[in-house]
Image (cartoon, rainbow, N blue to C red):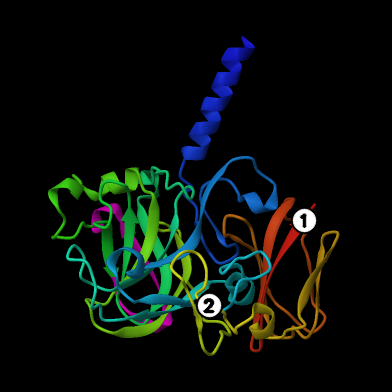
Amino acid sequence: MNKKIFGSMTLAMASLALAAVNTSLWFDGTNQQVNTGGDCVYEYGVCTTTTMGYWYDYDDRKNDKGSSYALYPYDMDTYKSLIGPMIEAVGYVYWGYNLSPNTGTTAAYPYNFVGFGFNTVNEAKDGLDMTAAAGLCATYTSDMAITLEVSEKVSGDASCSITLNKSPTTPVTVSKAIADFKQPSWVETANKLTSCSAAFAAAQSVKFKLDGGNAAAAGKVRIFEVGPAGTCLGGKAIGTEVATIECKSNGDGGLEGTCGTGFNDKVAASSVRAILSGHTLSFVGNVSGATVEVINLQGQVMMKSVLSSSSSLKLSNLNAGVYMVRVAGKSMNLNQKIMLK
């Protein structure tokens, strides 16, 4: 075969692979990268193409002259990440929020809001055809009703969305079809879509948004899982969290001022660690009565067991690759990556 033609075909196939939506669970707390496409995540160095995003917060300060903001439980880690510490500590993401009545809002959007989301492809906000996802699922808690939104460049702030009920302390799993999503009634003609199928066909981001309607509100949001409709597993539990969430977001990927909540200072001091020797997984520390799960990159639980004080697991039945080891007990939470060769 002509090498030039073969090379062009290879590039075309790579582009198609990159554009294909991942129909497995995208985020389950095992990694701060939200894997919306491809077969893995860049961090592990075991793939060449994938489509993914990172969690971020946004609010009414920058464009709408408001004063609402998000709060993080930890300061940045050594890799300048605000998300990594939460994944390592509890295996999910959680934020505080403060919705303030706006006195200087724009006429176009006179309401206060705080939101959390991830881009489907990259920071350039390229679109991803999420039609194959058939909708979205999520496992969450929220102190107030929260909207789940799919944004693309035509609709802008008039995203296709659905309102999820509040559930302050009990994780709730929902699964919504594309047809369940609607654009707001106030959307202007220029931003109107023929249907929300068009938003899923060119999705730039997925967001969870708290809208106070210009009333004051404060609380907490937890996101345990997000993915295509029907892929969320549920069965999640709230871990040992920071008592006071105090690191104020600057709305631009960092924190406002200094934050006294250091990751190394505030994560529950646990001496529990997982040690992989060959295909045997053992544990250092008192793990008696704790539950251990070995999870693959697709979020599937490959092994699960209740540990004794001297437990070890044989992983000889698992394929080589990267896994997350999650240990949860009365006074411990461990999320640790391992590479099985």
Q: Residue at x 57, y 81 (%)?
A: 259
What residue span does the magenta drawing correspond to? 164-181
Q: Indicate left or right for 150 with 57 as reference.
A: left
Position of residue 202 relative to residue 222, above or below, is above
Lower sequence index among marks 2 and 1? 2
Q: Is residue 217 magenta?
A: no
Of labels 2 and 1, the one closer to you: 2
Front residue of 163/53: it is: 53
Residue matched to label 1: 340
How many numbered marks does the figure carry?
2
Q: Residue at x 27, y 60 (%)?
A: 161
Q: Amino acid at mark 1?
A: Leu
Tell me residue 127's x, y (percent). Answer: 39, 44
Quarter of the figure with residue 271: bottom right
Instruction: Name the disc covering residue 257, or none.
Output: 2
Q: Main secondary structure of the magenta part?
A: strand
Asked which secondary structure carries label 2, the reply is: loop
